[in-house]
Amino acid sequence: MALTGLPPDADTDIARVSQALAMITPRWNARVLLALDAQPLRYKELARKVSWLLNGQLHLKLRQLCDAGLVQRTEHTTRHVTYGHTDRAAALLPVLPLIVTWAEKNLEKPERPLPAIEQIEDGLTLLTRRHAVALLWVLKVRGESSGRTLARMVMPDSDWTNVYPPLRQLVADGLVDTNGSGHPYRLSAAGDALGPVLGALSAWSAGQPLRQAAHHPVWGRPDAPPAAQKWVSNPSRLPAPTTTPAPTTRHSPSPALQHGGLFSHATPARPTAALPAGGPRR
């Protein structure tokens, strides 16, 4: 049974991307993945790097990531067990700098510089809103669309008015624009800029090299610069999670990502001419 009213190929792609996001977005999943080294770690070694997680929480995260095929548990002996990235996880990691790049350019900026891991988590949260991937897809293909048209294409088996809560959320998040009630919807500049991220997630979820993202039928940009290079995580700098919200202001663009740069706390100030209205909300 189709998930949307889109053609089968599009429906399958949207489902794959949504499933990929569901693997990495749950709280702490990305941090645990980034805390793992290229060399498999024993449980106690990993626990020291994510010390804010209780043992029960870390066990649960590892089990979820193992079930998702992103972490491999290897039992060398009954007393020697290690955890490491699977090939699928290693292929996914280069997508994360793309999210950081998008977030740096498009999300509203807090007063304090954010570690890149928080940029990743904020970006993932926006993409996992209900029906977000499908709605962004349709708006990219069609340009402007009415709420009724979007409902027919994205949720054909539901009352068409059910499309408005997710649409209002995407507007509040800054990924979709409209001139008001009764007017059509369209991608914002920030929503359109998600193309490299969604294209890379599509390529990864289909088992293709990430370079195929440039040729995605909807999100591809063949003339775009190459995707961010592979990076090596630096778990020793992995920041402890923070929960205190900060007022928004603007900062200047950060330099190109370096190895381990996903964990950097320092970013220069952004000029005031960045995005209108502060960019999408976090």
Image (cartoon, rainbow, N blue to C red):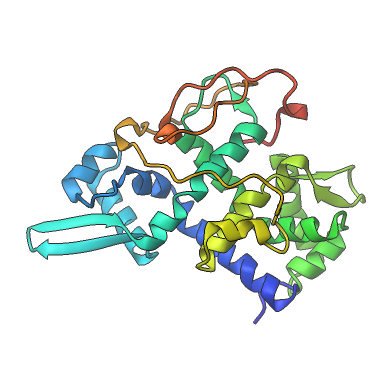
Residue 28 in view in this figure: yes
Q: Is residue 111 left or right of residue 232?
A: right
Screen quadrant of the C terminus: top right
Which residue occupies the extreme bottom position in the image? 1
Residue 55 vs 261, above or below: the answer is below
Give the vertical position of 98 relative to 271 (above or below).
below
Task: Note whether residue 129 is visible.
Answer: no
- Near-viewer residue (207 or 23): 207
Residue 206 at x, y percent in the picture? 54, 68
| Count of numbered labels shown in the rendering | 0
Given residues 55 and 221, the one toward you in this image is: 221
Rendered residue at 57%/62% (across/down): 203
Q: Quadrant of residue 277?
A: top right
The furthest residue to the right: 182
Q: Quadrant of the N terminus?
A: bottom right
What residue do we see at 60% from left, 50% from top?
197
- Nearer-the-camera pick, 118 or 157: 118
Taking the image as shown, residue 259 lies to the left or right of residue 137, namely left
Residue 220, image x, y percentages: 69, 56
Answer above or below: position of 126 versus 113: below
Which x, y percent locates residue 238?
35, 34
Q: Position of residue 280 (x, y in %)?
A: 69, 36
Task: Indicate whether 223 appears above or below 86.
Answer: above
Residue in view at x 42 percent, y 42 percent: 231
Q: Residue at x 26, y 54 (%)?
A: 59
**Residue 92 in the figure: left or right of residue 141:** left
